[in-house]
Image (spheres, grey):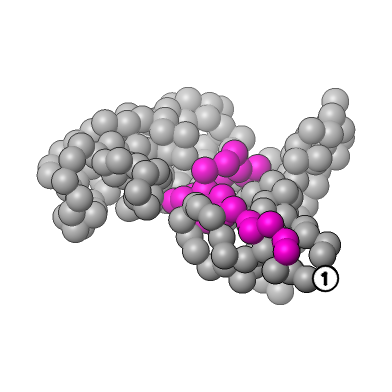
Amino acid sequence: RKPITVVLLTATPLDITALKANDKVGAIAHLGQPSVAVVGFSDLLYGRRSFAGRAVQTVYPAAYEDAISIADFNMRPGPSVFARPDCAMKNVSRCPRGVNPGRTYRFYEGKAVVPFGFGLSYTTFRYALRVVGATSFVVDVTNTGSMASDDVVLLFLVPPNAGADGVALKNLVAFDRVHVGVNATVSVALSVPSTVFAKKGAYRVEAGVRGDSRV
């Protein structure tokens, strides 16, 4: 058994690798910063309602802060003009320069502790992605578990040459939140502006953080 539930009240993404690896921790819930009301958590904790939230930030490993200076605002990965933050030399000009691993889910090339958009539920869902127009899609969301629940459907677009020459790895282009009963299927219509297809080449469309369904 894993008797401990960890509740995080913070707006800052923290490396929770040790908590995830702890065999006594059964669940980790991120409720946001304490100044924001968190009424209703007991309903989630005791299973009267199901979780359906999504991580709004990419949670990096702690080593991230040693690789790149907080003064480096570049989003894309690559060499930095700033010294590595873990350099102890008083003369920072002698310190090795940092290397930007990329920022946010769009450009971070490493393995996130918690990826942007990740979230768990007391039930399970199956996705089926359909193309219904040049820029219109439908995601059929089927509740395959034993509890009615909300689900947040995320639609990502993977552009041509993703991750190279400054091109993003993927982009969130649409989302919606729906309630799905047990054994029920809800069709979620999502449309995106044609401008997101401005770059020539083949695009891939994915529904879900892990690309649960793609075309």
Q: Is residue 113 above or below residue 195?
A: above
* Residues in magenta, as a range: 94-115
Estimate the x, y position of residue 208 in percent, counting from the top left: 43, 38
Q: Is residue 154 above or below residue 8?
A: above
Q: Nearer the viewer, residue 150 or 2?
A: 2
Q: Is residue 14 above or below residue 210?
A: below
Residue 62 placement, left or right of 132: right
Q: Nearer the viewer, residue 115 or 6?
A: 115
Residue 153 placement, left or right of 109: left
Could you tell me how many numbered marks the image carries?
Answer: 1
Q: Quick one: SS at disc 1?
A: loop
- Please tell me in which quadrant of the rendered image residue 56 appears: bottom right
Estimate the x, y position of residue 84 in percent, counting from the top left: 69, 59
- Please tell me in which quadrant of the rendered image residue 153 appears: top left
Q: Is residue 68 above or below residue 157?
A: below
Image quarter of the N terminus? top right
Label 1 environment density (alpha carbons within 10 Å; few <14, some 14–19, many ≥20) = few
Estimate the x, y position of residue 147 in percent, counting from the top left: 56, 33
